[in-house]
Structures are given as C-alpha cells and as structure tokens.
Amino acid sequence: MEEGKGEVGLHRLFRFADGADAALMAAGAAGAVASGVAQPLMPLVFGEVVDAFGSGSRHDVLHRVSGVCLKFFYLAVGSWFACFLPTAKISTKVLMLFNVSSEVACWMITGERQAACIRGLYLEAVLRQDIAFFDKEITTGQLVQRMSGDTILIQDAIGEKVGKFLQLTATFVGGFVVAFSKGWLLAAVMLSGIPTVAFLEEKMMYEEASQVAADAVVSIRTVASFCAQERVVTVYNNKCQASRTQGIRTGIIGGLGFGFSNMMVYTSSALCYFVAAQFVNHGKSTFPSVFKAFLSLILAMIGLSEASTIASDTKKAKEAATSIFSIIDKKSKIDSSTGEGLTLDPVNGDIEFNHISFKYPCRLDIQIFSDFTLNIPSGKNAALVGPSGSGKSTVIALLERFCDPDSGTISLDGVNIKNLKISWLRNKMGLVSQEPVLFNDTISANIAYGKNEVSEEEIIKASRAANAHEFISSMPQGYNTVVGERGTQLSGGQKQRVAIARAILKDPRILLLDEATSALDAESERVVQDTLNQAMVGRTTITVAHRLSTIQGADMIAVLNNGMIVEKGTHEALMGMEGGVYASFVELRSGTA
Ligand SMILES: Nc1ncnc2c1ncn2[C@@H]1O[C@H](COP(=O)(O)OP(=O)(O)OP(=O)(O)O)[C@@H](O)[C@H]1O
C-alpha cells in the first residue's frame, strides 16, 4: 500500500479549507482565545470577593461586595460579547446555536464542512481507481472505516479540538500572566509545586489506560458491523494476550504513580501554603494576592495538562489523514473521471484484440494471456466458451478497461481503446453479468441507473424490450417497487431482466453478456434468452456462456483454454471437427444433461 509514506503535517490537515472555513476558523480562534483568557480573570474577581467579605464593617462589606458584583457583571457581558460576536459575523444559521459557545460552534461547523469535503473527495478518488486497486489495496471494511471512523478523527482534530486547544492555551498563558503580575517571586515558588499536582495525576491516570480501552471498543464495533464477530473476538483475544504483561506493568506503575501524585498534591500544597504564609508574614504579599496567584496558577496548569491530552488525538488524526490523503492524491492508471480521449461518431463496433499479453496485477505469477488475438466484426455475435479459469471474463474486463493489457492492443473501429475517452467507451457498452447487481431503490431507478435524464417512456420502452414490463406492471407499486438490498425482493429471472433493461436503455453499440443466463432455471433462462436474442440484433455482442445450448446461433464461437483460442468457428463447423474440443464439450454436456 502506498499510504503511510510520510505522516501528514499538522497544517496539511486543513488543506481542504475554503474561504468560509478560514472565516469560521478566524472567528472561532478569536472566541476561543477570549473565553480562554476569561478563565484566569475569575480568580482576580474571586480574590476581591474574599477580600471584601474578610475585612471592614458590615456596611463596608455590602458596599465592597456590590462593587465586585458589578465587576462580575462586566465579565459576564464581556465574555458574552467575546463568544457572540464571531457568531454574528459568520452566518445566521449559526445563530440557531446561540446557546452554544460560538468558538465551539465555529470550530464544529468548519470541522463538519471540511470533513464532508474530505469524505466526498475520498469517495470520488476511490471510485475513479482501476480495478487492480480494489483487488490489491482496499477492502470494503477499510473503505467504511476510513469514511466513517478516520474522517471523524480528522474532523475532531481540525474542528472542536483546535478550539479547545486554543482556549486551554489562552487559559494557561493568561493564568501565568495573572499569577506573575501578583508577585513574580511568590508565583515562581508556587510554580515549583503546582505542575506536579495537575500534570502527573492526569498523565498517570488517564492517558495510557483509557486510550487503549477506547481504541479496542471502537474497532470492535466497526468490525462487528461487518458480521466478523468471530474474527473480532479472536483478534481481540490475541491483542489482550499480547498486552497482558504490558497491562500488569501499567497497573503497577499506574497504582504507584497515582499514589505518588496524590502524595505530591498534599505535599506541594502544604509547601505552597507555607511559603505563601512566609511572604504574608514578612509583608511581601497579602492574602488576596496569594489567593489570586494560587488560583490562577492552578487554572493555568489545568489548561496545560488538558491541552497536552489533545496532542495524542492530533497524532491519530494525522495518521488517519495520511492514509486518506494518499488515496485522494492517488492518480489512477485508468481514470474514468478524466474527460480526456477521443470519441467516435458513428461507432460501428468492430472489435480487435491484437497479441494481448496480460497478468492480473495482484496475481503476477499467473499469465492469463500470452498472445491472444481475436477479431469480432461489427454487428456479429461472438461467443466465448472454455473451462473455468480459461480467461473468458477477462476478455470482457479488458474491453471495458477495468484493466489494461501488459502488451498488445485492443481496438474499436481501428482505434486503440486506450486513446478513447473511458466514460464514452463504457457508455457504448452494455454489460449483463451472471449476478445482476441491483441497488436498494425502485425498479425504475435501477433501470435508469447511470443515466442522468431519462423519461418514463424510455424506461418502459427498455423494459418492454427486456420482457420485463409485464411483471413490473403487475406489481402493486409497478415501477416504483423498491427491490430491497441487492434486489432480494425479485426472483433471479426478474432481476436479470431488470439488468437487461438497464443495459438496453444505454442503447449500447456493444453488448457484453457474461454468463447472463447461467444462474437461471430452464423456464427463466428461456425467457431471458429470448430477450437477449432480441437485444443482440444490430449490436456487436460478446457472449460468455457455460450452457452451450444458448450460443448455438452465434456467428462465431471461440474456444479458450489457458488463455489461448484453441478452436474458432460456427457451431456447425466446430461440431464437424473430428476430436475437436468444442464437439467433445457438447457431447459431455449432453451426456450429463
Ligand atoms: N480480479 C482478479 N485478480 C486476480 N486474478 C483473477 C481476477 N479475476 C480472475 N482472475 C484469475 O484469472 C484467471 C481467468 O479468470 P476468468 O474469470 O477470466 O476465467 P473464466 O474463464 O471467465 O472463468 P469462469 O468460467 O469460471 O467464470 C483465473 O485463474 C482467475 O483466478
């Protein structure tokens, strides 16, 4: 896999931010800093409350406390402005969230916007990759995990977490400034004790243990949704086994560390209070100043310790972004989204495979074709038969440009298909395969799949041509019947006819039938085969068939074995070849039928 070549830098996480995101981030940053700075201002006012209650007569207390209350009111209004103003500047939609702090709202909105953009680009990038990518580089589970789990990690890191980090950093800096402004010497002495209080406790108690537990739960849920519970349990047990020693060690260290940090809390508090009392005793400080400095430093250190926990989330987001961005930036060898390439008008449908040599990129040890040559004239029906694994479906895959040959050329009307626009080429071909793929949507949406503007008449016309109109109309919801996941609410023959209608609607010049009837019972096969025979008229058709009865009328039958054409001709000609492979196939099949 190409991903993971180098970790994405922090600033690259924001690479998909647009102008609106920049505005949201600027407003969110201003709000975060303002609300962060507001925290250490509180001890100042609290200090004054303590001072006001602790000194003077009863009337004096009332007067002084009223003055401090006014300051609380100013702080409330100031903090409301700091939070509200950025919201008002951005969007009225955000106003709906007025009960949420604006910096949180701004960061959440921009995180959501950027993550939506990343998800869209990732899906686009995945869908434009060639088939080898799906064989080699990604599984469905990975795709879903990246689109849901990994993008949420990124969303958090570029959204809410940034706001929180800025706010905590502002609290940390603000707390320091306030504490040192109340007497730098006192603050410096207190500082020597306080970091242990806030820092050790957080680190030892939560960091390792909770991170491991959270990871395990998240991955179990994701994998379980793919019904891989047994595998999950095995993987989980193995992981538990491997980390047991680590767990015991962490437990002992955590216990010791927790005890130690608790001891340090009380020891350093005692030290701080003792030193502060010395300062007050020698007239170098006052009680309110000590109170303010102590509270500010506590807030500053809590800010610092919480900000440090965000670093591990950012690291995870960078890892997730590394794999997602590597796919977004990945150039596909066969990029169906490109608008480049020739188009032909008109298209006759002459197909030529010239000296093709090919191996699947993920199975380089197996040579599928070494010198495969086949010519299918326009409007003719060529059938491919041969033992399983002889390369029949690969012929279709190469023509559709799901993969490209290692050497040799495939041409349509004399033009190498590599020079044709891929989307145009694929639109000229209608593929019906053994297992028709229907989506969980209405019958009409399934027939119109892939075409943008299709009228109801066109859908009905294609359904009539596919012998599907009758059964569709007899359903209570008709063309609006939802077929269920993978078309489970239709029979095999019905599904196949819907798939044929979809292929016919494209009005393809070339029809590719890859064992289109082999999964059907005799009655359904007869109906579907009649349908296909009508659909073939006037089109170049390649039919891959196991049931030889369905291809007897083909203009040419090519018998493949190990990627080579061993016999070629009409049914009659091949049957006339004494000891021929085709004739022996037919004999074998009629013997077993
Ligand atoms: N996506 C793929 N990646 C790797 N190898 C593949 C892939 N698809 C097919 N193959 C291999 O290529 C060879 C030819 O497969 P292909 O599907 O073309 O045969 P086939 O004649 O159509 O077989 P069947 O009649 O069983 O469908 C087989 O050995 C198969 O295992």
Image (spheres, rainbow, N blue to C red):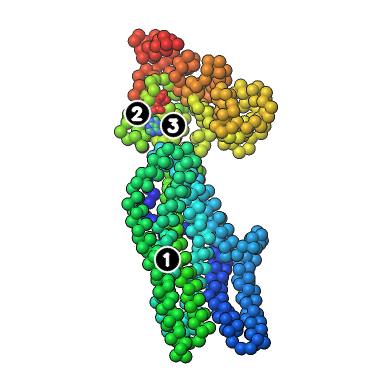
Quarter of the picture containing the N terminus is top left
Residue to which mark 2 is pinned: 369
Q: Amino acid at mark 2?
A: Phe
Quadrant of the displayed image that contains ligand 1:
top left
Disc 2 is placed on an element classified as strand
Quarter of the picture containing the C terminus is top left
Q: Amino acid at mark 3?
A: Ala
Q: Is residue 235 visible?
A: yes
The residue depicted at 32 percent of the width and 30 percent of the height is 367
Q: Which mark is residue 42?
A: none
Residue to which mark 3 is pinned: 397
Q: Which mark is residue 201?
A: 1
Against 510, residue 14 (above or below) is: below
Q: Is residue 344 visible?
A: no
The foreground one among 383 and 196 is 196
Q: Are marks 1 and 3 in contact (CB under 8 Å)?
A: no
The residue depicted at 39 percent of the width and 11 percent of the height is 588
Q: Is mark 1 within 8 Å of ligand 1?
A: no
On the image, which quarter does residue 282 sit in? Answer: bottom left
The residue depicted at 60 percent of the width and 31 percent of the height is 483
